[in-house]
Image: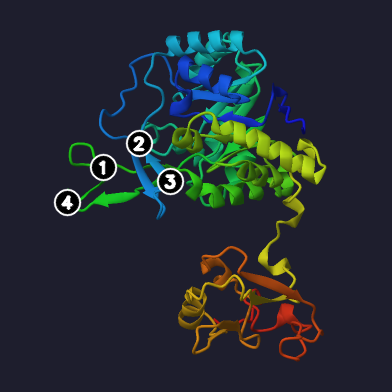
Amino acid sequence: MADLTSNFIGIKSPNPFWLASAPPTDKEYNVRRAFEAGWGGVVWKTLGEQGPPVVNVNGPRYGAIWGADRRLLGLNNIELITDRPLEVNLREMKSVKRDYPDRALIASIMVPCTEEAWKAILPLVEETGADGVELNFGCPHGMSERGMGSAVGQVPEYIEMVTRWVKQYTRMPCIVKLTPNITDIRKPAMAAHAGGADAVSLINTINSITSVDLDLFAPEPTIDGKGAHGGYCGPAVKPIALNMVAEIARSPEMRGLPISGIGGVTTWKDAAEFMALGAGNVQVCTAAMTYGFKIVQEMISGLAQYLDEKEITLPDLVGRAVPNVSDWQNLNLNYISKAKIDQDLCISCGRCYAACEDTSHQAIDMSDDRVFTVKDDECVACNLCVNVCPVEDCITMEQMAPGSVDPRTGKVVEAAPADWTSHPNNPMCATAAD
């Protein structure tokens, strides 16, 4: 079995699967259960400063988006940082770290944007034996209205300033958690890097309203007739998270900046994708809240089996896909493929035909007895038919070399024009028609 031992910025854990700072890591009881289930590390739910307690809502805290089979696709939460006293959290963290010295324990922190506030809390956290700190610059609701969370994460100058304070006042490795509620994720990442951050983690939750109660006319979850925007997470945000991780990983200014990947990790395959795009480890929340802590066991066994089959190590996987992440104008326009329908697998539902005929390129023919075939002359390889087909592998894309003869039509496959980069039909050309 592949060795999944992780060494992320000097923080060692038996595997690269950490629980993200969230309700599952809010207390000692939960974290002990997580470690017994096999999680390699946890980021304790975000700690605030000593003083007036944080008060959470006592009504519904989560909104949801489901698939057709009621599989949970996304959660919208309006919960704040921990509402438990700081001294209680610190005491429990110290107890857990003492009993599980081989597991990673990271303290997530959010305090006001003043040097004194950060200077005061860091020694208290350090005394617990925590392996590192994660600066929560991403929370989009509740705390951001108080000048914390994403209110800091959206201002690169603040990120750099606070990161410098943290590096000045603690020996612990510093991870900066980034908000996705920003136009260019590279700018806050560069600010964290400039401030001396040992790593960045992303993404935090996305500003969202998941639904509206059409009887009460209020966003859900609804508290006494009103609702508020919250933070969106779960499988639905994974594509956004993957892109942002890749943008940082391939940025020349930040090559080598360690990344902890967050956002919709539900299976070992999700984790492997994040790591292939540059994440050194992954953090999980919604999957644990949906299926329980033991889901990590499938992640561990699946990733180990994949690495064994590929005959690569965990470090080999990290960043392996980054060189293949490109900008559109660098794609090979002479690469040609055509759709092919496997008649033995086809159930004659007609979804490919309806989608292509109505919304695409009219490249699928339907016979009187409902046999569907691809019209190669019209097929532009858009892949829509593959994506709407309910039968896996029934429709596939076949690569065809330019200049070759298509055996199905007897016609020569044409390549893109030699001067395509300056061709007016190229949307990246300055002279392209609107």
- The tag earlier along the polypeptide, 2 or 4, is 2
Disc 4 designates what residue? 215
Residue 207 image label: none
Disc 3 designates what residue? 74
Question: Marks 1 and 3: which is nearer the front?
Answer: 3
- The tag earlier along the polypeptide, 4 or 3, is 3
Give the Cα distance between marks 1 and 3.
18 Å
Q: Quadrant of the C terminus?
A: bottom right
**Mark 2–mark 1 CB contact (< 8 Å):** yes
Mark 4 falls on what kind of element? loop
What's the residue type where badge 3 is placed? Gly
**Nearer the observer, 55 or 358:** 358
Q: Can residue 196 be seen in this view?
A: no
Q: Is residue 79 visible?
A: yes
Indicate the quadrant where residue 392 lies: bottom right
**Mark 3–mark 2 CB contact (< 8 Å):** no
| Residue count near mark 4 (Cα–Cα under 10 Å), binned few <14, some 14–19, many ≥20 | few
Give the Cα distance between marks 4 and 1.
13 Å
- Residue 152 falls left or right of residue 429: left
Mark 3 falls on what kind of element? strand
Residue 78 image label: 2
Give the Cα distance between marks 3 and 2.
13 Å
Residue 131, image x, y percentages: 63, 18
Q: Which residue is drawn at 74% across and 48% down?
A: 252
| Residue count near mark 2 (Cα–Cα under 10 Å), binned few <14, some 14–19, many ≥20 | many
What's the residue type where badge 2 is placed? Ile
Q: Which residue is drawn at 46% across and 38% down?
A: 150
Mark 2 falls on what kind of element? loop
Mark 1 falls on what kind of element? loop
Residue 227 image label: 1
Q: Residue at x 63, y 25 (%)?
A: 40
